[in-house]
């Protein structure tokens, strides 16, 4: 009845219903006009939830990283740009702690859906830290969690339930089932009802580690984050669009350097940045996409400010010295304060 999709541009033309991640759902809502009809619940290691979280983690044994500020100048692994849990939430958490992914981290490696490769690269020390989904870690590496330093561990609730897994960031709904506007309302209603009646013991639910489905979750917070990060943007025709996460160039074009706080920043030209990334940092692993500090201080603005301040200081200092030399013989013309030091009393 539905399938998970990997390319936003094909959804309207080829599919009626799609099960996809939170970041993708918010994109089809604003870009394609789709509507969420159900949200899945998962059961992992005996624990269940209708939400997912994001973990920003490093190794406890890596003494160079004790807190988020220590991620400056490090290599970091993420998932893909449209993922709320493996990119966007981590991006926001770092920014809240004055560490900006686009200017402060030496290299960001986008592992896509290969979370296992990212996790093993952190364990082996090939990279310093990573962003990963809370439920993925709980499902695949519960025995290794004690090795990890989780940065800002939260215990939030979702729909009245305490989230049973580790998370560093606010929760987002689990994968949602969205439907095209072309689907008849009655069919949408029947699909939603059938899914919400799915029993956890059904073979399909067991195979997919599903507890079942609930009514549609809200993806408004995810959408707001994506708009802030310019992942959702307006094109030349003023239509809302999502960045194509599989196009390295479009990913690069989506980076917003202007709104970075603390200074004036510009974006390095794409070709120049790729060459610099490969020459000055560890080369990007085979088959993956990387970016290295795409936002840099604007040399013209920063040079002008520095030059102006220095010139003003020199001018003030020079005027002060000149006035002191001119007024020196007139400091006490009437002798009101007694003898001036030798050489300074007026004849």
Image (cartoon, helix red, strand yellow):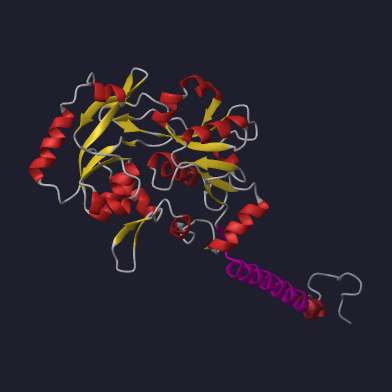
Residue 49 seen in this snapshot: no
> Picture coordinates of residue 185 (x, y %)?
9, 45
- In the displayed structure image, the side of residue 5 where residue 282 appears, left or right: right
Instruction: Write the residue at 38% across / 34% down.
Output: 53
Q: Quadrant of the N terminus?
A: top left
Q: Quadrant of the C terminus?
A: bottom right
Q: Relative to residue 278, is residue 169 depicted above or below?
A: above
User: As rendered, which of 91 and 339 lies closer to the eye?
Assistant: 91
> Picture coordinates of residue 129 (x, y %)?
55, 37
In magenta segment, residue 245: no
User: As rendered, which of 214 and 190 lies closer to the eye?
Assistant: 190
Residue 72 seen in this snapshot: yes
Residue placed furthest toward the left: 186
Residue range highlighted in magenta:
295-323
Quarter holding residue 319: bottom right
Q: Relative to residue 42, is residue 26 depicted above or below?
A: below
Instruction: Write the residue at 35% across / 45% down.
Output: 6
- In the displayed structure image, the side of residue 241 where residue 177 appears, left or right: left
> Picture coordinates of residue 39 (x, y %)?
24, 35
- In the displayed structure image, the side of residue 292 where residue 10 appears, left or right: left
Name the dominant secondary structure of the magenta segment. Answer: helix
Residue placed furthest toward the right: 342
Instruction: Write the residue at 38% across / 55% down.
Output: 243
User: As rendered, which of 58 and 298 lies closer to the eye?
Assistant: 58
Instruction: Write the residue at 26% across / 24% down.
Output: 205
- In the displayed structure image, the side of residue 338 where residue 98 appears, left or right: left
Q: Relative to residue 134, is residue 177 depicted above or below?
A: below
In magenta segment, residue 303: yes
> Picture coordinates of residue 329 (x, y %)?
82, 79
Quarter holding residue 235: bottom left
């Amino acid at each position: 009845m539905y399938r998970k999709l990997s390319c936003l541009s094909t959804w309207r033309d080829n599919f009626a219903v799609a099960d996809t991640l939170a970041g993708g759902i918010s994109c089809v809502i604003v870009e394609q006009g789709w509507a969420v009809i159900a949200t899945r619940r998962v059961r992992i290691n005996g624990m269940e939830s209708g939400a997912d979280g994001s973990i920003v983690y490093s190794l406890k044994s890596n003494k160079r990283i004790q807190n988020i500020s220590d991620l400056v100048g490090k290599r970091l692994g993420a998932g893909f740009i449209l993922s709320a849990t493996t990119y966007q939430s981590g991006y926001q958490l770092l920014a809240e702690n004055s560490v900006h992914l686009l200017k402060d981290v030496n290299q960001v490696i986008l592992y896509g859906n290969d979370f296992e490769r990212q996790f093993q690269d952190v364990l082996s020390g090939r990279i310093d830290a990573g962003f990963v989904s809370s439920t993925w870690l709980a499902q695949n590496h519960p025995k290794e969690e004690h090795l990890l330093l989780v940065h800002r561990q939260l215990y939030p609730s979702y729909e009245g339930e305490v989230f049973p897994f580790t998370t560093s960031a606010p929760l987002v709904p689990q994968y949602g089932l969205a439907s095209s506007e072309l689907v008849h309302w009655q069919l949408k209603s029947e699909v939603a009802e059938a899914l919400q009646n799915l029993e956890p013991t059904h073979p399909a639910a067991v195979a997919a580690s599903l507890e079942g489905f609930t009514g549609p979750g809200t993806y408004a917070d995810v959408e707001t984050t994506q708009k802030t990060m310019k992942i959702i943007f307006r094109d030349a025709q003023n239509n809302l669009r999502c960045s194509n996460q599989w196009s390295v160039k479009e990913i690069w074009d989506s980076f917003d350097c202007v709104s970075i706080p603390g200074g004036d920043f510009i974006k390095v030209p794409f070709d120049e940045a790729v060459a610099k990334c490969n020459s000055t940092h560890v080369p990007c692993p085979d088959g993956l996409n990387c970016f290295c500090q795409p936002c840099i201080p604007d040399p013209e603005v920063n040079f002008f400010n520095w030059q102006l301040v220095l010139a003003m200081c020199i001018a003030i200092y020079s005027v002060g010295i000149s006035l002191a030399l001119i007024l020196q013989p007139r400091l006490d013309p009437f002798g009101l304060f007694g003898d001036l030091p030798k050489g300074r009393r007026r004849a």
